[in-house]
Amino acid sequence: MISVETAVHLIQQHLPDWGTETVPLTEPRYSRLAEAISSDRPYPPIDRIMMDGIALRWAAYESGQRAFPILGVVPAGEVPPMLTDPQACFEVMTGAALPQGCDLVIPYEVLEIRDGMAYIRHPEPWSPYQFVHRCGSDAPAGQQVLAAGTPLHSPAWGILASVGQTEVRVQRRPRTQIVATGNELLPPDHVPQPHQLRLSNAYALMAALKRQGYAQVSIIHLPDDPVQLATHYRQASQEYDLLIYCGGVSKGKFDYLPQLWRDQGVEQYIHGVAQCPGKPLWFGVDHRQQTAVFGLPGNPVSSLVCLHRYVLDMPPLYARLATPFAFEQPLTYFLPVKLETTKTAELIAHPRPMHNSGDFLALADSDGFLELPASQAVFAAGECYRYFPWS
Amino acid sequence: MISVETAVHLIQQHLPDWGTETVPLTEPRYSRLAEAISSDRPYPPIDRIMMDGIALRWAAYESGQRAFPILGVVPAGEVPPMLTDPQACFEVMTGAALPQGCDLVIPYEVLEIRDGMAYIRHPEPWSPYQFVHRCGSDAPAGQQVLAAGTPLHSPAWGILASVGQTEVRVQRRPRTQIVATGNELLPPDHVPQPHQLRLSNAYALMAALKRQGYAQVSIIHLPDDPVQLATHYRQASQEYDLLIYCGGVSKGKFDYLPQLWRDQGVEQYIHGVAQCPGKPLWFGVDHRQQTAVFGLPGNPVSSLVCLHRYVLDMPPLYARLATPFAFEQPLTYFLPVKLETTKTAELIAHPRPMHNSGDFLALADSDGFLELPASQAVFAAGECYRYFPWS
């Protein structure tokens, strides 16, 4: 069996490049930028006033002049006027463009305004362009302001709007179908017999994918019937970029899905990873249609852990184990934890181990999971490990 | 001016209770549970087999019997049969229900199966119900499995499906309109004159709200015209639960919005908070329609910071300042930072100060912001402060 690291590497290497798609500004959705974004004009685009006050010529002030006739008021958003009289001034508002011919702003705090005149009451050694945010000082026109690959959090959408990007190319989220297999499964609106279970994995996986900006996610439930599964595969591999199989497949039964996928022309890259839960993980690619196929292990916790570790692209964190934990087998162990954030800026992970159940109920009080390396059997309190929050 | 803490308290105290709404399992969306969820039946609902092997009577094994005729195979999802012969056994698959009359499971690893018989090759001191996950041991029927208020991350959706909740009551996200005011603003698809700006705040705010599960968010741009603003308010306060005003309002102009809101019957709770940026923050409630009104300061960074601090309900984190920072005024300072996550499970905040611009460009390289308390002017490297990640 391969290691978790090898599995991650194989997936990165073979996962198809699904290209890009365009998202409009009006329907922001989480993904990563697929193109670099540059400034369309200098920022700020004007010499921008930073304080309410008057704008004048520095030379006049420097020569000792302290009373200035006011030619008018310049609010933000208006075409800046020309200072026709070098001994005069304009009243200017924060955000306005510096009037042409002016190179100094003096704030109201040191002024008296009376009868159309501004009097400087507290002269100070002002320098030219003080309280002026110079045109282009944040970015000249044509400078990269967002790199390709930037995650699209809210400030990025503000930047895109600022520079006039009404739509943006992002990494395309694959059209995804979750295929729940298992004769013992019923839809959630059914009342199961004691030996039956409701379909639940698929809904947890869908919720996780949607939160990460996967807009097209559907669910289908199929019985454990190779003919139906093969028929479905041929159609679905044309319509979807990503097929995520999961559901109540016991060990014996699970084995025919890999054979079925291989028979359908899917190239297998992973079958079995040295991890718990999630040992039977399968991954392959149908190169004819660029369709990726994940076979997630049947139990709910395995499938959700594998989705987060291998499919979602979430930034890595580390958390400190609050209490000791032991796992004897030479497998990477994924341990559900409750996260505590301390005032000393630490992330503390409180184990919420699964006991003997693979059921979702055990995750009710967890925020994510730790990845405990296969090379250790005993994990002491205070040690730090990779932490994956639930999407 | 009131403190940030007082402002948070006033908002919590006066923000209307917008009740609950129903979200279907098939359209998961981030919010918090508005009801407690209980198990509909015992979990597991059966005595569940945990290993592939045989199921038999412990008394027969204990009496020394080591060869058992196999009556049949029990896969997961089938009605468990009755063990009619107390000296016989069933082959059982992981996830299957324990056949009636059996109280012991012995895994294949210690068995030999030949000619319809199971032979125990490596007898061990098995105890009754070993490798059986007992019915109801995770939760009896009727036990609370999710508390009201639980954030709806992916495992919660799996639990909801498990217990048969095809829809769920969540805290209702308010119908929200973002009102951008300012004559200098143009829609993002226009080419502005140098003294004009594109509407950008509103798009950043909308992206932040949508990521938190606000499904109904619209944007409107209105000129700085009290008559139009009043007309709009009367209509919008009927249609929306939450009105977030922002946009290029200079200090002088901004003052007429509070008067306009008060004239329209909005009860004012906050006008001005001892913080930078965002000093002019306004908050009130129109109690006739349960409409909340936020007046966010004009500059883009202020409006986004205020949205995260006062409107969004995001869990608190703490991060450690990587380099010293100083801010002399007795105001809470919101400092944009780039977050580093260390292998020692620490969150380190690298300041990305705003310099003299309130523009979004400065946030391109930030992940969120620190809240630096008003009581300090100097913030040493290594000190920890509250951290808010960008939505």
Image (cartoon, coloured by chain):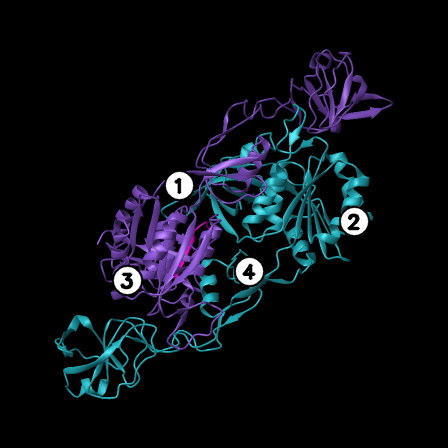
Chain colours: A purple, B cyan
The reply to whether label 4 and label 3 mark residues of one chain is no
Asked if A43 appears above or below B110 in the picture, the reply is above
**What percent of the width, then of the height, locates residue A9?**
29, 44
Q: Residue at x 27, y 83 (%)?
A: B102
In the image, which disc is placed on residue A247? none
The residues tagged by marks 3 and 1 sit, at their Cα atoms, a distance apart of 28 Å
Q: Nearer the viewer, mark 1 or mark 4?
A: 1
- For disc 4, the chain is B
Q: Nearer the viewer, residue A131 or A294?
A: A294
Left or right: where B75 falls relative to A27: left
Q: Residue at x 52, y 45 (%)?
A: A29
Q: Residue at x 77, y 58 (%)?
A: B288
Give the residue number, with chain letter if any, for mark 2: B234
User: Which three-letter amino acid code belongs to the residue tagged 2?
Assistant: Arg
Left or right: where B348 falls relative to B223: left
- For disc 2, the chain is B
Secondary structure mostly taken by the magenta-highlighted segment of the chain: strand
Left or right: where A145 falls relative to A202: right
The residues tagged by marks 3 and 2 sit, at their Cα atoms, a distance apart of 62 Å
Give the residue number, with chain letter if any, for mark 4: B32
Give the residue number, with chain letter if any, for mark 3: A254
Which residue reaches farthest right? A115
Give the residue number, with chain letter if any, for mark 1: A18
Q: Tell me whether circle 1 and circle 2 mark residues in contact (CB < 8 Å).
A: no
**Magenta span of residues:** A344-351
**Visible in this render: residue B361?**
yes
**Visible in this render: residue A317?**
no
**What percent of the width, then of the height, locates residue A302?**
34, 60
Q: Tell me whether circle 1 and circle 4 mark residues in contact (CB < 8 Å).
A: no
Asked if A60 appears above or below A171 in the picture, the reply is above
The residues tagged by marks 4 and 3 sit, at their Cα atoms, a distance apart of 36 Å
